[in-house]
Each structure stands twice: as structure tokens, then as C-alpha cells.
Image (spheres, helix red, strand yellow):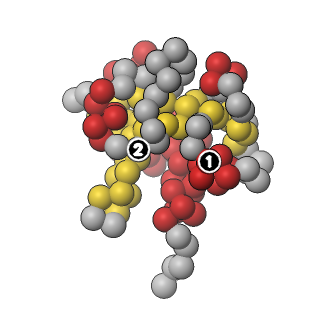
Amino acid sequence: MLSASNNEWEGLILTKMLHSISRNKSIIIYSRDKVLRDEFRNSSSIHIVENCQKSDFILAKDGVNSSCKKPTIVFSYYEYLKTPTAVGVFFWQKGRPTIRFSSKRLKHFELHVKGELSKFVSTND
């Protein structure tokens, strides 16, 4: 039985999501969430910045700063539907991770999902 916590799984899944849509091997993220920042603190491929304008992506657990028009990954389906910059969503449902990407929003940012996560791209939103 695997004994990773949800935070560890979350970090692994987010890393995979970011690498599947990023053009760069080194990804710069912005997040106001301390747990998320701590999760990526020691990552060799994902770097954290304090200014959203200097980031490639935003990870937003507590709402999105509307002045920063960067591609965003959110953590609730409700936020995903209401946030125009949300290219992806990740949340736990019945103990399982749920991932979705918006083809329309990815296209707006000139991004596309590579690899095994491409099956999570939705054309309905």
C-alpha cells in the first residue's frame, strides 16, 4: 500500500499537469497558497516567484487575481467554470484525483496538452 499523503500526490499530479502543457523544461509558477509553495520549494524543474507577472502559470486555491492574465490551474470545478484564465482544474472527488483541461482556454494561451494527460482535455467548456 502506498503511503503518500494527499499533498504529496497533489504535488506529483500538478507537476505532471504543468509539464504536459508547458513549452519549457523549467516552469515558473506563482501561488499565494503556502502549502503549494512549500510543495515546490525543492523542485528542480518548477520555480516559485512572488510576482504573478513574472510567472508562466498561476496555481490558485483561493481565487484568482484578475489583474494577472496568466494561464491558471484552479482547485475547484466552480472556480474552473467562473475563471476565464483557468486552463485546467485539479480536485479530489470521492478520494480520487479529477483533472480537466479546457481546449478553448488552452488555445487562447497557445498551449496544448502533451502525452497521457491529453485525454483530459474537454471541448465542452
Q: Is residue 28 left or right of residue 99?
A: right
| Residue linked to disc 1 | 34
Can I make out residue 99 in this image?
Answer: yes
Which residue sits at x=30%, y=27%? 82
Mark 2–mark 1 Cα distance, whole angstroms, equals: 15 Å
Local crowd size for mark 1, using a 10 Å CA cut-off: few (<14), some (14–19), many (≥20): few
Dot 1 amino acid type: Lys
Rendered location of residue 71, percent (x, y): 50, 25
Which residue sits at x=26%, y=27%? 125
- Give 78 or 43, whichever is nearer the viewer: 78
Can I make out residue 103 in this image?
Answer: no
Task: Judge whether 102 appears above or below 20 on screen.
Answer: above
| Residue linked to disc 2 | 75
Q: Is residue 97 left or right of residue 52?
A: left
Q: Find the residue positioned furthest to the bottom.
A: 1
Which secondary structure lies at badge 1? helix
Dot 2 amino acid type: Phe
